[in-house]
Image (cartoon, rainbow, N blue to C red):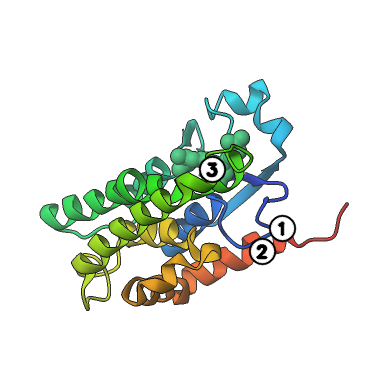
Amino acid sequence: MRITITAFDRSPDGGKGLARDTRVRWALEEVGQPYDVRLVDFAEMKEPAHLAIHPFGQIPTYEEGDLALFETGGIVFHLAERFPGLLPEDAAGRARAITWMFAAVNTVEPVILDLVNVRILEGDKPWAAERMPLVVERIHGRLRQLAARLGEAEWLDGAFSAGDLMMVSVLLRLRPSGLLDQHPGLAAYVARGEARPAYRRAFADQLAVNTRPAD
Ligand SMILES: N[C@@H](CCC(=O)N[C@@H](CS)C(=O)NCC(=O)O)C(=O)O
């Protein structure tokens, strides 16, 4: 059954790989599944056809026959369950890897997203500058905790898993801010993720879309 995902017709990041289709592309590459990409612009994302798949009018979505999914955590989890390569065989190891997936999207990503909120969405508010140090300190606090747990390990819990895929993807969103560089252990962890051949293919594919000549 051929898989189709959606991605930005032109990502606002110009191809830095920060749009969330990259993590789904990465998972698909890790499990060796070919896929098609349907590009959508901001207007199309809010139209009924797309809303029927994604209730919040966002990308990415995932279609495989009759199955239509949204939310990167759900999509990557589905891929990890359906195909070998992203979750350990043993039940306890699987449970821990899944826990890291949730930690990435539920505990780490929200504090990182606040940076975008305060910089872009709330940038013109009189209190934005005052709020910024709080947002930055919350990120550093979370990163210190994560770095302490990772320690000298290569990945979060044994072999590379969907938990690492989600965590690296979330941390990558910090790259433009420079905040990640203040946590060398995590910066190295992210670099290990980016060095994986599957990530490189995913990144190159989204870059090609976002740097193609205008129609
Ligand atoms: N929690 C969702 C977030 C999806 C999301 O925010 N997608 C962004 C692109 S990275 C988007 O479509 N933004 C446009 C919009 O919200 O209108 C997920 O992980 O899939």
Q: CA distance from mark 2 to mark 1?
A: 5 Å
Find out if the beta carbon at label 1 lies less than 8 Å from the nearest ligand 1 atom.
Answer: no
Res. 37 mark? none
Query: Element under label 1?
Result: helix
**Residue located 66% across and 61% down the image:** 15
Q: Is residue 190 above or below residue 6?
A: below
Q: Determine whether, in the image, residue 105 is placed left or right of residue 1.
A: left
Q: Amino acid at mark 3?
A: Ala
Res. 207 mark? 2
Q: Is residue 39 above or below residue 34?
A: above
Residue 10, image x, y percentages: 72, 50
| Disc 3 packing (10 Å; few <14; some 14–19; many ≥20) | some
Q: Are marks 2 and 1 in contact (CB under 8 Å)?
A: yes
Q: Amino acid at mark 2?
A: Leu
Q: Amino acid at mark 1?
A: Asn
Query: Element under label 3?
Result: helix
Question: Which quadrant of the render holds ligand 1?
Answer: top right
| Disc 2 packing (10 Å; few <14; some 14–19; many ≥20) | some
Of residues 120 and 171, which is closer to you in this image? Answer: 120
Of residues 60 and 37, which is closer to you in this image? Answer: 60
Can residue 92 be seen in the rendering of this structure? yes
Tag 3 residue:
128
Mark positioned earlier in the residue sequence (1 or 3): 3
Residue 103, image x, y percentages: 28, 49
Tag 1 residue:
210
